[in-house]
Image (tube, rainbow, N blue to C red):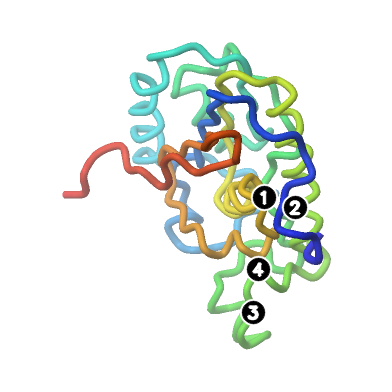
Amino acid sequence: MEGQSLTTNQHDPAPGSEVILIRHGETEWSLSGQHTGSTDIPLTARGEQAASGLAPLLAARPFSLVLCSPLQRARRTCELAGLAGEACLEPDLAEWNYGAYEGLTTAQIQARRPGWMVFRDGCPEGESPAQVGERVDRVIGRIRTNGGRVALFAHGHLLRVLVARWIGLTPSHGAHFLLDTATLNVLSDYRGLPAVKCWNAPLAPEA
C-alpha cells in the first residue's frame, strides 16, 4: 500500500457524485486525547448536541447510501443527525485498531517510543497504515460502485486515511488532514478527478 503510485485503485468518481464524511461527536476520550479504537464509549452531552445540529444540514437532499461504523459513538451521531433509518453498518469504517496503544495519549505513547506517529508507524498488536488503507479502499470501491450522494459516519484517524486515499495519496498522508469532531467534510470530483470540496467545516463559528 505505502509503495503504491499516487493513484487510487478504484474507478474514478461518477461526475456529480458527492460523499459527506462525518466524524462522530465529542467523547470523554476525544477531549482527553486518548486513542479510542475499539473502546465503545458514548458521546458527551456536548457531543450529542453537536450531532443533533447536523440534522438540518443533512436533510436538504436525499442520500443514495448511508454507511456507519458499528461503534456506538458513530451510530449515535448518525441517529441524532437523522439518518439512522437509512444507515447500513459497515465494519470497515471502525476506527484504527490501536492495539497496545488503546486508551493512551500521544504523549504517553511517545514516552515509550519517541517520535511515534500513527500514520507512519501504526500500532503494535493493532493495525498498520497499510491495513487501514486496505479497509478504506474497500469503502471507496463501494461508494464509487453505488454513485450518487453518500454519507459516512466514522472516526478521526480512519477518515483522515480515507480522504488521502480518495485523492490518490498513501495512507500516511492522512497526517496532513486535521479533523475535529462533528464537522462536515465533502469529497467530490473535479472534471472526473477525485477532489476535496470541503474539509473540517464547523457547524457554527467558534465563540
Q: CA distance from mark 4 to mark 2?
A: 13 Å
**On residue 165, which mark appears?**
1
**Closest to the observer: 16 or 65?**
16
Which of the marked residues, 2 or 1, is nearer the chain's N terminus?
2
**Image depth: mark 2 or mark 3 in front:** 2
Q: Secondary structure at mark 1?
A: helix
Q: Is residue 119 above or below residue 82?
A: below
Q: Which residue is mark 3?
A: 116
Q: Is residue 32 above or below residue 139?
A: below
**Image depth: mark 4 or mark 1 in front:** 1
Query: Residue visible at 63% across and 18% down?
Result: 65
**Image depth: mark 4 or mark 2 in front:** 2
Q: Which residue is mark 2?
A: 133
**Labels 4 and 1 touching (C-beta < 8 A):** no
Which of the marked residues, 1 or 3, is nearer the chain's N terminus?
3
Q: Secondary structure at mark 3?
A: loop
x and y, in percent, of residue 46 in the image: 34, 40
**Labels 4 and 2 touching (C-beta < 8 A):** no
